[in-house]
């Protein structure tokens, strides 16, 4: 259930409210300041999402390595410079997904229902 709500960009507290206002996966969209259903505040302090940049970087590195490994089956040499445009293309295609997913992972990491219930 947690994994399903995380991939659908739902609130970590109620699992019903949307974190982003736009439904399109390939658009950056506006992030809601709080959950429309349970009113959980997503941005708990200024600069809260700076850590999400590191998560986004880790996602991009993992995608780059996966793209490199997959491309190795289609190119004959050990390292071919033709793989680099494919890696850049994958990173550009998945940049909006990485942006959203990194923020949602960061929210799920720090805004669990247990912590909110204690406050």
Image (spheres, rainbow, N blue to C red):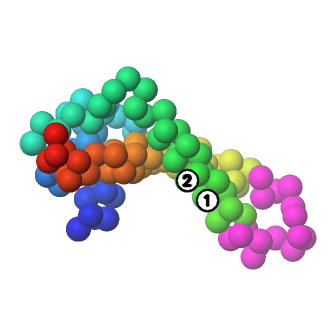
Left of 66 or right of it: where is 116?
A: left
Dividing the image into 4 quarters, which one contains the C terminus? top left
Numbered circle sitting on residue 59: 2
Instruction: Provide the residue span drawn in magenta.
Output: 69-84
Which residue: 64% across, 54% down?
61
Q: Do labels 2 and 1 touch, CB within 8 Å?
A: yes
Instruction: Count neighbours of disc 1 (C-alpha within 10 A) and say few if under 14, some if 14 to 19, many if 20 or more.
Output: few
**Nearer-the-camera pick, 118 or 112:** 118
Q: Is residue 81 magenta?
A: yes
Secondary element at image label 1: helix
Where does residue 48 sit, x and y in percent of width and height? 40, 32
CA gap between label 2 and label 1 equals 5 Å
Horizontal side, residue 47 vs residue 1: left or right = right
State yes or no: residue 89 in magenta. no
How would you rate the neighbour count of disc 2 (Cα within 10 Å): few for under 14, some for 14-19, many for 20 or more?
many
The residue that mark 1 highlights is: 62
- Secondary structure of the residue carrying tag 2 is helix
């Amino acid at each position: 259930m947690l994994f399903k709500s995380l991939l659908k960009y739902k609130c970590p507290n109620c699992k019903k409210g949307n974190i982003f206002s736009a439904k399109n996966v390939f658009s950056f969209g506006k992030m809601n300041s709080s959950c429309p259903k349970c009113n959980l505040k997503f941005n708990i302090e200024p600069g809260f999402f700076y850590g999400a940049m590191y998560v986004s970087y880790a996602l991009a590195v993992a995608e780059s390595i996966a793209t490199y490994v997959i491309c190795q089956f289609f190119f004959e040499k050990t390292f071919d410079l033709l793989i680099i445009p494919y890696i850049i293309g994958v990173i550009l295609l998945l940049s909006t997904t990485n942006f959203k997913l990194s923020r949602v992972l960061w929210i799920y990491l720090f805004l669990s229902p247990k912590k909110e219930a204690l406050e």
